[in-house]
Amino acid sequence: MVLSKISSQSDVSVHSTFASRYVRESLPRYRMPDNSIPKEAAFQIINDELMLDGRPRLNLASFVTTWMEPECDKLIMDALNKNYVDMDEYPVTTELQNRCVNMIAHLFNAPLGESEAAVGVGTVGSSEAIMLAGLAFKRKWQNKRRALGLPCDKPNIVTGANVQVCWEKFARYFEVELKEVKLTEGYYVMDPEKAVEMVDENTICVAAILGSTLNGEFEDVKKLNDLLTEKNRVTGWDTPIHVDAASGGFIAPFLWPELEWDFRLPLVKSINVSGHKYGLVYAGVGWAIWRSKDDLPDELIFHINYLGADQPTFTLNFSKGSSQIIAQYYQLIRLGHEGYRNVMENCHENAMFLREGLERTGRFEIVSKEIGVPLVAFSLKDNSRHDEFEIAEMLRSYGWIVPAYTMPADAQHITVLRVVIREDFSRTLAERLVLDVTKVLHELDNLPVRLHAKSTAVVEEAAGEGGSGRVNGTFLKKTEIETQREITTYWKKFVANKKKNNKNTIC
């Protein structure tokens, strides 16, 4: 007689994960479930959904680091349970942050004495760093205005329209007017002359970008400093400069060390940089560095003692992980000047290779510069048949994530594709991308004109023939059934023509 045991439905230990009931039922998505599930099932369910995400290393839209050495990965994992704010409990981590601040300050040529400590703080990316720098400028300006008996209720910042959205957040959250220098076609960064013209007695600082998000270009901080120095001399103001070096701060010192954009310029009072971009650390870590103690009002620094000792803190949030700070220190001592220079040179060379490959197609206008962040921003010379958004969409089928976007005012009629070259983007991948872009162009050439362009042409033609397509310069909106009929008719003609022209083709 064979003895057998029928396991109960609750005896999950004998079931394969994919044979269990947990993968046969839809799990709650918006309410916490009543009962627990096995850890294996929870892992598998989440892991399976995450497979539908894009691959980070093929995400060419992002500036954020997507690869680090295994040794650093281990340091990160070992520190995941450390809350950085507990400085008394984790003094070594605090010391590592201070070392990073000093190394970065020296990299940016801060005027420090032999034994003088730099002034700065680790942040959760450049967004927090910009908020802190902006608050310091606002408070210093307010204090000076109050001391002179002048109103201080209408502060403003002058920037280019190409600034990252975190500047708009700062302006809105902390009630500062954002005065933007508009862009023009062919010039996609802030014009220093126009910026200085916009400066008035209520300007708390002018923000320059070292590495525009739109096309990677470095703004001319040296020219801005010279023009602003002259205006300050004439007006008696002391309007300072902040440099948003989120992307370029770890590039310029190694590729173009002679370029003056940092604390070598007297009006540059603070700089932010993203450690998780070309600082080569996973998201999210940033750094805010001030020229001197005088540039950071002491009243913004809080002192707490309920974690074991007196701890100064100047952050927007309180708790944060220690892992990225430790990872930043690892990269700084692991790579040194030599290693960072090698990485940045490699990124720059791959960007130039990609640029040349795209130019060889004869189809693109390159809008990025050779001196700047290693990226390639480009637009179609002729987008009358197909546009940049279609290219971005079709590249997805090859695994590439390449963003397409329109420029800000007053260049919003320009559409651009952008490929960011990071440390883990090899020459082989660059070659592959050029090949895939060429394939996409060929595929688009063999497709009918995109629907919205064709519809526009049809309506304009109807208006020209006395039809009702355009009335007083305004297009009339087609009904849903009219649009569907037009699409159906168009595709029937397209397929019929294909069959007619390819009689010997076996489908």
Image (cartoon, grey):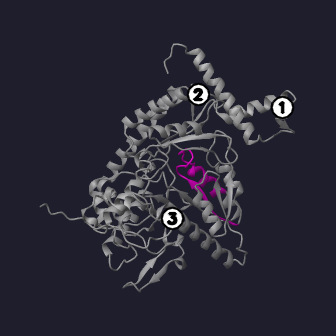
Please, is residue 246 above or below residue 416 in the view?
below
Could you tell me how far apart the alpha carbons at marks 2 and 3 are, in whole angstroms?
A: 47 Å
Q: Is residue 98 left or right of residue 301?
A: left
* Image quadrant occupied by the N terminus: bottom left
Label 1: which residue? 463
| Mark 2 residue crowding within 10 angstroms, few (<14) / some (14–19) / many (20+) | few
The disc placed on residue 311 is none
Could you tell me how far apart the alpha carbons at marks 1 and 3 are, in whole angstroms?
A: 54 Å
Please, is residue 229 above or below residue 387 in the view?
below
User: Which amino acid, by three-letter code, is at mark 3?
Assistant: Ala
104 drawn magenta: no
218 drawn magenta: yes
Task: Give the magenta range.
Answer: 202-230
Q: Residue furthest front?
A: 1
Label 3: which residue? 129
Q: Residue 78 at what x, y percent from top left?
A: 28, 66
Q: Earlier in the sequence, mark 2 or mark 3?
A: 3
Q: Residue at x 59, y 20 (%)?
A: 498
Q: Is residue 404 visible?
A: yes
User: Which amino acid, by three-letter code, is at mark 2?
Assistant: Leu
| Mark 3 residue crowding within 10 angstroms, few (<14) / some (14–19) / many (20+) | many
